Image: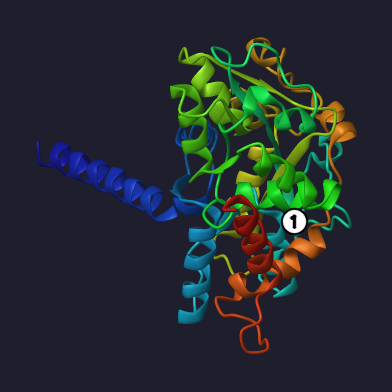
Amino acid sequence: MHCRKLVSLCAAAVCLTALSMTAHAQQKLYVYTSMKESMVSGLKTAFMKKHPDIKIDFQSAGAGKLMAKIAAERESGKILADVLWTSEIPDFYQLKANGLLLKYVPTEIKSLTNPIPDYDGSFTPARLGTIGIAYNTRFVKEAPKSWDDLKKPAFKGAFGIANPALSGTAFMSVDVLVQKFGWQFFEGLRANGAKIGKGSGQVVDDTASGDLVGCLGVDYITLDKVEKGATLALVFPPEMLVIPSPVAIFKNSPNADAAKKFVDFLVSREGQAIIAEDGTIPVRTDVSIPERFRAVLPPADQAMKRALPVDYRKMAAEKEAEVRGTKKPEAAGQLSDKEATIKKFTDIMQK
């Protein structure tokens, strides 16, 4: 009897030790991201199923807020995130220039559509975000075919653009359109009564409600509304706004091995299929656009052929002060390039 008790106690001790070792061995991975909750949730579930030894937590916020948080953490001596995944490539160029990113080339890099010039593994595109023209089909009966169509009477007084001072996506959209068409493009929109909105989500909401008849619409935000029954449509002019969303690992991450597994998963066929289901373009050519989105979203290779050229290095210079968490030295009263762009846009849109 005593032997049985002893054996039972020993077995229990072994189990407890094993559980303790498992708990101790489980790595924790912290990802800062600006991606939406439904996408993040699906990726988290699938990743932890594939890697039960890694506990992954996401902190979701706008790219600007995340960069401010990273700057504050860096100032205090330790960046808490292991991985960063947002849609603002200039941030990644500056983090790279500051020596904060770990170079890692995913195992399946040859399967990816990679629009990043001088790629060296410091950051890798994980999706191709697109910004098109969202419009309310109750009020706009003919789909716009070009960016200049936004100056037509159908959009008079009721076309919205998210505030680039509040939305990183809006800032990049404005900057790219200025690079291509010049400030006269926005002067023409304003002459037709275009308005500044707030966030990228709000201008789509306002278009769905009829407060606006159209807006610069982020793909997954607009298509989510369409799926929920909103009388919205999303179209892309021949010259597309395509904004890659990079993922990167911080150099001093104590969980670099787990972070590499996450990056590999994110760009794997499984990870990209989850991303595609949320109404945005995957970076893999062997992952199809879901059937319900094919009438709107082109495959990755076609999107890149139509993409407006982007000077990422110029944008990186404009964002330098933000990433440091301090303003770069400038003459008294002089604005940074980004501040000057936002001010110019605001001045035009508030005339």
The image shows residue 175, relative to residue 189, as above or below, that is below
| Label 1: few (<14), some (14–19) or many (≥20) C-alpha neighbours in 10 Å | some
Residue 199 can be seen, yes or no? yes
Q: Quadrant of residue 272?
A: top right
Closer to the camera, 51 or 135?
135
Q: Residue 351: x percent and y percent?
A: 60, 53
Residue drawn at the location 82% of the way across and 42% of the way down = 109
Q: Is residue 260 left or right of residue 7?
A: right
Residue drawn at the location 46% of the way across and 30% of the way down = 206
Q: Residue 199: x percent and y percent?
A: 49, 44
Q: Residue 20: x percent and y percent?
A: 33, 52
Q: How many marks?
A: 1
Image quadrant for the N terminus?
Answer: top left
Q: Amino acid at mark 1?
A: Tyr
Q: Is residue 96 left or right of residue 160?
A: right
Closer to the camera, 254 or 321?
321
Q: Is residue 151 left or right of residue 78?
A: right
Regarding mark 1 in the picture, which secondary structure is present there? loop
Residue drawn at the location 48% of the way across and 46% of the way down = 198
Of all residues, the one furthest to the left in this rendering is: 1
The image shows residue 267, relative to residue 74, as above or below, that is above
Q: Residue 172: x percent and y percent?
A: 69, 51
The image shows residue 339, relative to residue 178, as above or below, that is below
The image shows residue 269, relative to residue 170, as above or below, that is above
Q: Which residue is mark 1?
A: 104
Closer to the camera, 219 or 80?
219
Residue 125 can be seen, yes or no? no
* Colour option used: rainbow
Q: Quadrant of residue 141?
A: top right
